[in-house]
Amino acid sequence: MKEYFARICYNTLEWKRPSGFEGKGISKDNYEREYGYGHEEWLFDESKIIDGYHYAFLQPMGKFTYAGEIEDVHLYCRSLTSGKLYLGIIHNVECITKRQYTIAYNAYVKNGWLKEMKSDIKAVGGVASQLGQDEYPLFNIRFKLKDMDINLSNPRIISEDDPNTKSPRYRRYSKKGDIIFCDEPEKKQKQHGAMELKSEHRVQFNTDIRQVSYDPLHNKMQNAIKKILESTGEYQTVTIEKNSVDIIAVSLNGERDYYELKTYAAKASIRAALGQILEYVHYPAQKNADRMIIVGPNNPDKYDIKYLQYLRNTYNIPVWYQRYSFEDNSLSKMI
């Protein structure tokens, strides 16, 4: 299988939906700057599956330029503060044909997904009317979620000397050898500085952390997980949005599990959920639940797992993580 490198646009919401202007290109002819989003910003939105495939867009793949080819694609982006971030690899990426595009596009319209994507764009002040109406197709690739080897919790830093990622352009490049990483904190500091100015462009984001009310992925997860927990036969009641808690599940022996759902990578989901779920369980000075369970759509890496184990062992905080899979509608074991 041939391996290629593809740069993707910057995104602060882990490529599940557009995140606005922060970190994007600043040239006047930049598509993201003009319309407020890039087509790649739904790359890891795992909630939209058609016959086992997730359809997405990669600018380096062009407009059906490589239709019919199947390849492994390494992904990276450029961050203003960290340099080049290696996100991982997607195996068996299929460059779709125009016929496959038409079938997928019609499914997006039928399922209301295209309308949902336009709402995502409007939420960050973008021009939603451009979606599907310009020179770029809505998607040009498809892949199965099981073929993703992506780490958004702790992406590695790519060295400026790496031969695979020297070009600033969004093109497809053949892999030229092993990736050269630069993960030491002191090297990050030396190369990119401790602090850079943030964008002053005012944008309203739909994110869990800022507690904006509507997040379609969150709602899909919440409804699906409620049904999964009810189907296990281990709980006498499963309720959603009671006292602001995403899900409260009371077991047959009366133990209470509080579930807090986030739509980010494991590390970010834990960070965003931990303060909330601690407050729900203990504020002002009480114990409302026996276990605190954080759920996200991505697998934790070894550091995420060590972190939760450390919290349990050191502070006796009964907190665990579970992954919800959109692909097969399942919950992993508690980690």
Image (cartoon, helix red, strand yellow):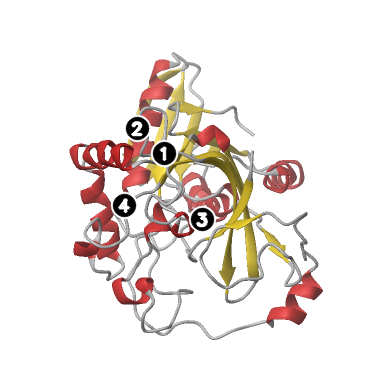
Q: Nearer the viewer, mark 1 or mark 3?
A: 1
Q: Answer few, some or many: residues within 10 Å of disc 3's Cα (few below 14, many 20 plus, some between 14 and 19).
A: many
Mark 4, other Cα within 10 Å: few <14 / some 14–19 / many ≥20:
many
Q: Amino acid at mark 4?
A: Leu
- The residue identified by callout 2 is 50
Q: Are marks 1 and 2 in contact (CB under 8 Å)?
A: yes
From the viewer's perspective, tell me whether residue 289 is left or right of residue 132.
right
Q: Which amino acid type is marked by label 2?
A: Ile
Q: Position of residue 183 (x, y in %)?
A: 77, 64
Q: How many marks?
A: 4
Secondary structure beneath dot 4 equals: loop
> Helix, strand or loop at disc 3?
helix
Residue 155: x %, y % from top left: 65, 57
Question: What is the CA distance from the residue labelled 4 to the residue labelled 2?
Answer: 15 Å
Give the residue displayed 39% in from the left and 74% down from the top.
Answer: 21
**Helix, strand or loop at mark 2:** loop
- What is the C-alpha distance between the residues marked 1 and 2? 6 Å
Which residue is denoted by mark 1 in the rendering? 54
- Are there few (<14), some (14-19), or many (20+) residues within 10 Å of tag 1? many
Residue topped by disc 4: 138
Side of 171 relative to 308 (left or right): left
Residue beneath the point at 74% across and 68% down: 159
Of the image marks 3 and 4, the number of the one nearer the N terminus:
4
Please name the residue that numbered disc 3 is placed on: 272
- Nearer mark to the viewer, of 4 and 2: 4
Where does the image place residue 115, in percent across and percent down from the top left?
21, 50
- How far apart are the alpha carbons under marks 1 and 4? 12 Å
Looking at the rendered structure, the secondary structure element under dot 1 is strand
Cα separation, mark 3 vs mark 4, equals 31 Å
